[in-house]
Every structure is written in C-alpha cells, then in structure tokens.
Image (cartoon, coloured by chain):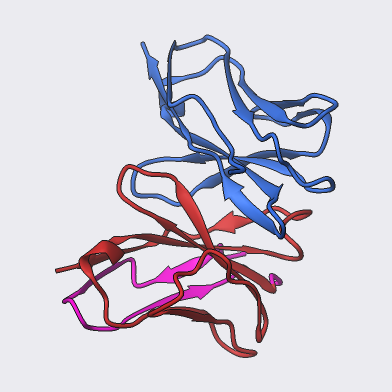
Amino acid sequence: NAGVMQNPRHLVRRRGQEARLRCSPMKGHSHVYWYRQLPEEGLKFMVYLQKENIIDESGMPKERFSAEFPKEGPSILRIQQVVRGDSAAYFCASSPGDSRKETQYFGPGTRLLVL
Amino acid sequence: LAKTTQPISMDSYEGQEVNITCSHNNIATNDYITWYQQFPSQGPRFIIQGYKTKVTNEVASLFIPADRKSSTLSLPRVSLSDTAVYYCLVALNTGFQKLVFGTGTRLLVSP
C-alpha cells in the first residue's frame, strides 16, 4: 500500500509565477490536509478537504492560495503570483476519516523555492 | 491565544529514557492527541496516538492526565537514530476546531 505521494518534490519559481503542488492520498483515504513549514519552524495547518469539498480553510492566506480535491485525481494546492515569502516546505497528509479521530499520514513534502 | 507548547530542545544519551511534554490548555473535548517524529527534509512520521490515560506501542508510550491539558511522549532507551524533532498534534477549541501542531522539540541523542 503506497503512502501519501507528493509531487514535485522540489519546485523553483520566479516571483509572480504560479505554483501547483499535488498530493495523492493513501489508498482508501478521502480526507486530505495541507500544512506549510517555513525553514526552521514548525508545521502550520492550512486547509482540510474531503472529496470535492473544503471543510476548513482557516489556515489559508486569504489571497493567492487555493486548494481543491476533485472527485478524480490528486488534491492540488495552488499558489498564484508567488512571492519570496512563499518559499517553504508544503506537506500533505491524509486520513481515512475525520483526523480528529483518525491518524494522519504525511507525504514527503514539496519544497518550494521562489527566486 | 490558544496554543500548543513544547520545550524547544532536549539532550540525552544512548540508552536513556526521554520524556517530552506538550501543553495544550485548550484542547477539544473529544479529539485525539498525536505525536510525530520528523527528520530533516522529510515529512512527519506517526509515532503514537491517544485520547486519555496511557497508550503504549512498540516504539513509545503516551501519558495523558485526566484533564488532558498536557501529554507526555516517552521514548524508552533512545538511540542515535532517535535524534529528530518531535511534534504533538491536537485539535483546539478556538471557536472552530482547528488542528494545531506543537512548537516542536529538537531531541539530540549523543553516544
């Protein structure tokens, strides 16, 4: 059973470009979470999605950031018009049900560098 | 401001027991407490999860007092490979329940 997959593992963008980060949850998992980790800091919750629904996006910046988890395919975290402050590691996690009662399993992360 | 706090760092020697405490004053009533281990450039790896009292698995124990305002991860007989950052993860009652990672504890195990 493959774990949580994220791609790309590393992404370099220039200021103003768009970044698309993909997350394929573990088989059988329908709940996906995105976290951001700035260098030398802890993980910060961004958004919680179920298939086709955003459940909690309280940690997402109000502008430029969006997330989706379509019926088919991976979850996508999109960052428009990236700025240097967006440089961070972005981790995706998945769980079979509500993570407050189910364990979240994390992917290897995507490291975004904005030049 | 509701938050989840841990000691910034801890030092230990091989073979010793290490206890790392996480304080979460505003934890949600019905949610689990989960602990993760993270190595540099990797995603967090699940260690243990519990709701109350004590939970033990093959790698760690988790102690949770009755009020659930803190939890303690216990690593028996640590080895050099246990050098990592350890995070607790809880859901807090912040008006809406939100998942919050602790501040992280950097454990250094020396020979």
- Image coordinates for residue A56, horizontal then vertical, percent: 64, 70
The hue in which chain A appears in the rendered picture of the protein: red
Name the residue rendered at 73%, 65% in the picture: A96
- Image coordinates for residue B85, horizontal then vertical, percent: 44, 34
Q: Quadrant of residue B75?
A: top right
- Please state if B61 lies on the left or on the right of A11 as rendered: right
Question: Does A8 appear above or below A3?
Answer: below
Considering depth in this image, is B70 or A26 the residue closer to the camera?
B70
Question: Does B39 appear above or below B72?
Answer: below
Q: Quadrant of residue A3?
A: bottom right
Q: How many marks?
A: 0
Considering depth in this image, is A106 or A67 the residue closer to the camera?
A67
Name the residue rendered at 14%, 69% in the picture: A115
- Please state if B7 lies on the left or on the right of A78 as rendered: right
Magenta range is: A1-29
Does the magenta portion include A28? Answer: yes
Name the residue rendered at 30%, 66% in the picture: A86
Question: Does A43 appear above or below B23?
Answer: below
- Image coordinates for residue A55, horizontal then vertical, percent: 68, 74
Considering depth in this image, is B54 or B30 the residue closer to the camera?
B30
Looking at the rendered image, the quarter that the N terminus of chain B falls into is: top right
Shown in blue, the chain is B
- Please state if A56 lies on the left or on the right of A82 as rendered: right
Q: Quadrant of residue B27?
A: top right
- Please state if A39 lies on the left or on the right of A94 as rendered: left
- Image coordinates for residue A35, horizontal then vertical, percent: 49, 60
Outermost residue toward the front?
B1
Looking at the rendered image, the quarter that the C terminus of chain B falls into is: top left
